[in-house]
Amino acid sequence: MHHQWLLLAACFWVIFMFMVASKFITLTFKDPDGYGAKQEPLILTAVTKVEEVHVPEEKHWPEEFQPTGKAFSGNLIRQPLVHMERLELLRNVCRDTALRNLSHTAVSKFVLDRIFVCDKHKILFCQTPKVGNTQWKKVLIVLNGAFSSIEEIPENIVHDHEKNGLPRLSSFSDSEIKKRLSLYFKFFIVRDPFERLISAFKDKFVHNPRFEPWYRHEIAPGIIRKYRKNRTETKGLQFEDFVRYLGDPNHRWLDVQFGDHIIHWVTYVELCAPCEITYSVIGHHETLEDDAPYILKAAGIDHLVSYPTIPPGITVYNKTKVERYFSGISKRDIRRLYARFEGDFKLFGYREPDFLLN
């Protein structure tokens, strides 16, 4: 009888332990929202998305090429990939010793004169004429407090540097220049080099909308005297003459005579020294609709000012126009021109023109 009670008690104990174990299993593997086993796929999905951004860890930016400015103080993952690629391309071409003479220049007073300063928001903007710079000047004028809105700025004030409230970097002491170059957000805009030259030729020697008579009456005759093949031709400056002047390895003796007026057609390298100055962003005229808002946001000023409305199609590269302008130019003259501007093509990712390859 005693053994029967022991056997019965053992059975009840086994049943009791089974019930406890069953309850424990139910509590452990229960799947309430946000917890338990189904949480693991969510974590894996998040990891997969981060990996798709493709920011290679093995690539480290040298200190001299680290982007500066408020928007880039953290991880480079904050930059859209296209801007990272532009800066990386610039870094690689700057290191190419074969292109050193075309990619490097001294940070001279000529360069510092091209850089406008907004101390209030710690911004430096390098002017590259014929690439929509007038609108960027308006943005900086508003930021500096000279006018409360872009619409209020008279057109004649924008390029009057005694009245527009835009100090040049060259106006500061050496120590102040170094401090701003080191700490400020810095940017400039580029466009296809040959299309920019066409724009400069049309603006200064054909239409001349700002009535700057010295381009037609002083600079054009100087180019014609030296570079026109048919001396009996009485037309004004032709694009062919302009190309011969720019492609001449000895162009500098005329540049000295023309003074700062050459800013409209010298290279981006000569204007902004991109291999010597660490720029935060390089905008492209062809993608300005995207780049302008990005630059404002990256500089931390998108809540203060907007870039003026861009007319539809105005920033699109016009291949037909470029080919038409160069159709009457000899291959020799085009090759010499490209040889001078090759640094600009390579530094900023522009393709060598098809008509030069044929």
Image (cartoon, rainbow, N blue to C red):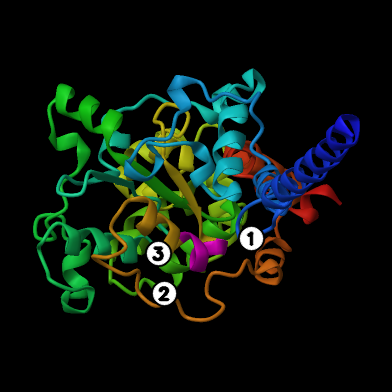
How many C-alpha atoms fall within 10 Å of the one at disc 2: few (<14), some, or many (≥20)?
few
Give the amino acid at mark 3: Lys
Gap between marks 2 and 3 measured at Cα: 7 Å
Gap between marks 2 and 1 measured at Cα: 73 Å
**Residue 227 placed where, x, y %?**
55, 48
Q: Residue at x 30, y 28 (%)?
A: 108
How many C-alpha atoms fall within 10 Å of the one at disc 1: few (<14), some, or many (≥20)?
few
Which of pointers 2 and 1 indicates the residue nearer the eye? 1
Q: Is residue 50 left or right of residue 190?
A: right
Q: Residue at x 28, y 58 (%)?
A: 301
* Image height of 278 relative to 293, above or below: above
Which of pointers 3 and 1 indicates the residue nearer the eye? 1
Q: Are marks 2 and 1 in contact (CB under 8 Å)?
A: no
Q: Is residue 26 left or right of residue 245?
A: right
Label ID, residue 184: none
Which of disc 1 and disc 3 is earlier in sequence? Answer: 1
What residue would you read off at disc 3? 204
Label ID, residue 207: 2
Label ID, residue 32: 1
Highlighted range, magenta: 286-291
Q: Residue at x 39, y 30 (%)?
A: 277
